[in-house]
Amino acid sequence: MFDKVTLKLNVDPYILGALKEDITSEDVSTNSVMPKFQLGEVDLICKQDGVICGLQVFSRVFELLDENTTTQLFVNDGDKVTKGMLLAKVTGDIRVLLCGERTALNYLQRMSGIATYTNSIVQLLEGTAIQLLDTRKTTPNNRIFEKYAVKVGGGNNHRYNLTDGVLLKDNHIGAAGGVKEAVAMAKAYASFVRKIEVEVETLDMVKEAVEAGADIIMLDNMSHDMMKEAIDIIDGRAQVEVSGNVTKENIAKLSNLSVDFVSSGALTHSAPIMDISLKNLHPIS
């Protein structure tokens, strides 16, 4: 859950931006049928099984439009929900309920979809010591929501952004002139509290990364047999991350490897939305 400070400083501006995108000057449809205030209530209905996520953001959309809007929640983020379940009731000015509906649902459906997809992969890794990580392959201006959804689904966050840590990828290594050079330069520049991770694609690069003193070695797009060889070379001298086209369909093949982390961009860029609707809007006195 977002604390009050995070909500106001880092979440509200994005929600307001989304509302401005959807309402240039007015909601013409709503103003046509509801020209003045009328208190109303609408049901939030789950239309498929999954893990719910984003309820706080959902309710915040309506609150930013009108602080008198209230949301009665019957579930919490992280709960397993089923088709047909009543998740919440929203009460307020019908005009607010109508013009905030799509933005609120967009957040809730997207975040719940990510949480659901993440949870399905976490279950495939049960019984192992592997931690599932997300990546920076997120929707622009939605990272805070998508990475939160990964956590709710049982996954873990990799770097939030480029300031968080050192990850030397192929182009960084090319710019530096090699793995050893890149690691040495990173150690000289970055604070000692930051770990240095190196992305490698060959066994020679693995050896160089180990010799250079990398803290984490990311095995990128390697075959299963090649990963086994790489892990033997590393021999516990660095933590090991596996990355590269990891999805729900192939992650089980990695469960027998002695690796610390598996990162998957699919958690945020390929998760389907969860089907959720606002239904039964009606006036109340």
Image (spheres, rainbow, N blue to C red):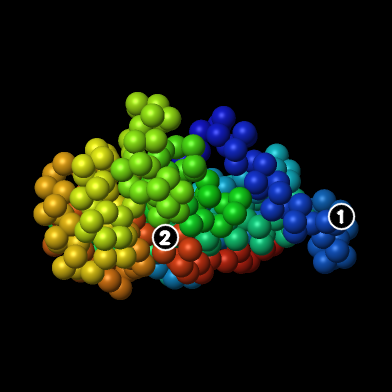
- Name which residue type carries label 2: Gly
Residue 80 screen position, x and y as percent: 36, 58
Q: Which mark is residue 99?
A: none
Which quadrant of the figure has residue 8? top right
Instruction: State the separation of the CA atoms marked 2 and 1.
Output: 37 Å
Residue 70 appears in the picture as rendered = no
Is 109 placed left or right of 38 in the picture? left
Between 221 and 254, the one nearer to me in the picture: 221
Local crowd at mark 2 within 10 Å, few (<14), some, or many (≥20)?
some
Q: Residue at x 79, y 56 (%)?
A: 23
Q: Residue at x 35, y 27 (%)?
A: 193
- Name which residue type carries label 1: Ser
Residue 40 screen position, x and y as percent: 70, 55
Residue 177 appears in the picture as rendered = yes
Q: Nearer the viewer, mark 2 or mark 1?
A: 2
Precedes in sequence: disc 2 or disc 1? 1
Instruction: Tell me: residue 191, above or below residue 143.
Output: above
Q: Residue at x 26, y 46 (%)?
A: 209
Local crowd at mark 1 within 10 Å, few (<14), some, or many (≥20)?
few
Q: Residue at x 11, y 54 (%)?
A: 232
Is 263 placed left or right of 144 in the picture? left
For mark 2, what is the residue? 265
Is 244 placed left or right of 87 in the picture? left
Between 152 and 265, the one nearer to me in the picture: 265
Tag 1 secondary structure: loop
Q: Which mark is residue 25?
A: 1
Residue 270 screen position, x and y as percent: 46, 67
